[in-house]
Image (cartoon, rainbow, N blue to C red):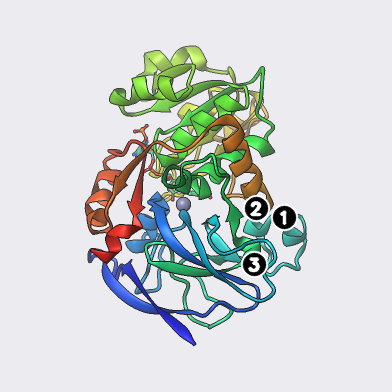
Amino acid sequence: MHSTTLGYAAQAAHTPLAPYRFERREPGPHDVQIEIQYCGVCHSDLHTARDEWHNTVYPAVPGHEIIGRVTAVGAHVSKFSIGQTVGVGCMVDSCQACPSCDEGLEQYCENGFTGTYNSEEKETGGITYGGYSSQIVVNENFVLRVPDSLDPAAAAPLLCAGITTYSPLRHWKVGKGQKVGIVGLGGLGHMGVKIAHAMGAEVVLFTTSPDKVDDALRLGADEVVISRDEAQMAPHVGTFDFILNTVAAPHNLDMFLILLKREGTMTLVGAPATPHPSPEVFNLIMKRRHLAGSLIGGIEETQEMLDFCAAHGITSDIEMINIQDINAAYERMLKSDVKYRFVIDMASLKA
Ligand code: NAP
Ligand code: ZN
């Protein structure tokens, strides 16, 4: 048994996304079926739709910032009930048996997690299709509770942009008394500013877009630096405990590494299609600095992040679009022209 689903798919790397009809599995005993109401637009969706990471299987239905309402539950589902508002992020499955899964770090599953899109679906052997669609069926272990106090549309981006910034900020123990840099004010970056501020850190936002300065201050930055202006960068050399770099394009990492204190860490979450130029190794060894990476976050930590955001009144700043506008939205995202996350109103699919 299958159920027909309407979505938007990329059919090839250089053609626009267009309507696409496909089948999803009927919910099994441990599955939750979700009518999708909102889906955020992550830069990873664009990387995938255009095969920039050279691993896309077409047709590709992107979308991994999903908010919707439960429409059916399998016989053994205990955590969710019909009518509940829930979320789905970047993963829909993992092996649940390896040491990483045991520790709640499913994103580092040693047998490979199943991505919400462009992954092999264990149940069917097909390819997973993401949230640019009318409905999705997901194992209950990969479904999140969305606190009632969060606006559902503005909560959608928390499922990727929120957790991808929350997880490294937590892992590197960001908090009061620390000076923290966020590089890039896009979807991830603006969540990083809000969350690092809520964790009590002194937050400095680095941007290439002078028109974002006022917004960054409003979002919680204590200071904003135009990263292309050497005079603004110079006073910050050697002063940061931690820097979270969200930039989606290759760039010079040295200009940020030298801002770290001795033993400070810069964590990369941006995933550009081509490599950054290698940093100058002396910038690392002379001050025992760390250059690190981080991938989304585990399911338990994603729930913790949603609850943290509810407790601090944090959601994403969004611009709502219809699904028919998705190709134009991608072009604007490439120009860093989004304040600060596009969210698709999935009701528009029916138009
Ligand atoms: P986004 O909304 O497009 O934001 C990226 C920001 O980077 C832009 O707003 C811009 O900020 C800055 N930027 C862009 N091009 C730049 C350039 N050439 N030089 C310097 N700065 C530049 O993208 P996003 O959705 O936040 O995603 C960011 C990256 O993270 C993507 O590569 C995405 O695939 C990746 N990602 C990784 C994970 C993970 O788990 N590690 C999860 C989700 C996404 P300013 O205008 O402020 O300069
Ligand atoms: Zn994402």
Residue at image point 52% right, 80% down: 26
Query: CA gap, disc 2 to disc 3?
Result: 11 Å
Q: What residue sits right under mark 1 in the picture?
A: 104
Residue 307 in view in this figure? yes
Q: Which quadrant would residue 323 be assigned to in this image? A: bottom left
Q: Secondary structure at mark 1?
A: loop
Q: Secondary structure at mark 2?
A: loop
> Is residue 173 or residue 243 the one in the foreground?
173
Q: What residue sits right under mark 3 in the picture?
A: 94
Residue at image point 46% right, 40% down: 188
Q: What residue sits right under mark 2 in the picture?
A: 298
Residue 273 in view in this figure? no
Q: Disc 2, ligand 1: is the CB inside 8 Å?
A: no
Residue at image point 59% right, 60% down: 143
Q: Secondary structure at mark 3?
A: loop
Q: Amino acid at mark 1?
A: Gly
> Quarter holding the C terminus?
bottom left
